[in-house]
Amino acid sequence: MLDTVRQIETPEGVSLRLHAAGAIPRAHAWLIDFGLRAIAAFVLLAILGTLGRTGMGIGMLVLFAVYWIYSVPFEVWADGQTPGKRMIGLRVVNSDGTPVTLLPSVVRNLLRTVDGLPGVYGVGLACCLLDPHGRRIGDIVAGTMVVHVLGRGALAEVPQEVAEAPATPLRLEEQEAIVAFAGRSRNLHEARQRELADLLEPLTGRMGNAGLRKLVAHANWLLGRS
């Protein structure tokens, strides 16, 4: 039930860490979504029930849609987050870290039938516990995973600069060091900023303010800014 970290490398040579969510936070998000669906279904059925048989027929279609389609629009068009996932701080993404698209979202949600067996997500829970990245069967088949949404404080603190890729591939710890330095540089005296940036002259090929701007440009590129 513990959360795990999945490290992947993009074609551009950038290492990413996906903090996979374990069974407990996923269960919390599911309970919230279940409660919201139950409330919505109850209200709609109460209203449609006043229409007699026609209303009940429509109500059955509504229940089907609420159960099977509820998550898909949120996952595809709301940054991979249902209301429950947003409250808990989770997101559905593809296994390579890219945003989930329509087909994988539909597949993972249709396979809830399998994960829900023999009741209360027994198969899904067992699969989450056995899989190193906490995925249920629907996630494995669809090529998706549920990850924690990490705080964006560092991103917000890094000054805006035209992004520029480093001239040489960097190890993950080197990438993290550059982003951390760029995010905290404003808290340092200007002379200290230049002093630290000069240490990375072999990477930037610049000294002084030019080297500092180069490091910030690299940090913007590592953060995916354009």
Image (cartoon, rainbow, N blue to C red):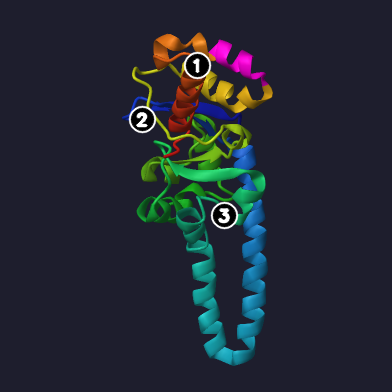
In percent of the image, x 66 and y 54: which residue is there?
A: 32
> Relative to 77, is 62 above or below?
below
Q: Give the range drawn in magenta.
A: 188-196
> Relative to 38, is 212 above or below?
above
Is residue 164 at least partly visible in the picture?
A: yes
Q: Residue 9 location, x and y as percent? A: 38, 26
Q: Which of 77 and 123 is in front in this view?
A: 77
Q: Is residue 67 left or right of residue 169?
A: right
Q: Is mark 3 on a helix, strand or loop?
A: loop
Q: Residue 183 location, x and y as percent? A: 59, 27
Q: Nearer the viewer, residue 101 or 60?
A: 101
Q: Nearer the viewer, residue 150 or 205?
A: 205
Which residue carries the number 1 mark? Answer: 173
In percent of the image, x 44 and y 11: which residue is there?
A: 201
The mark closer to the camera, 2 or 3, is 2
Question: Alpha-carbon distance for marks 1 and 3?
Answer: 32 Å
Q: What element carries label 1?
A: helix
Q: Which amino acid does label 3 sit on?
A: Thr
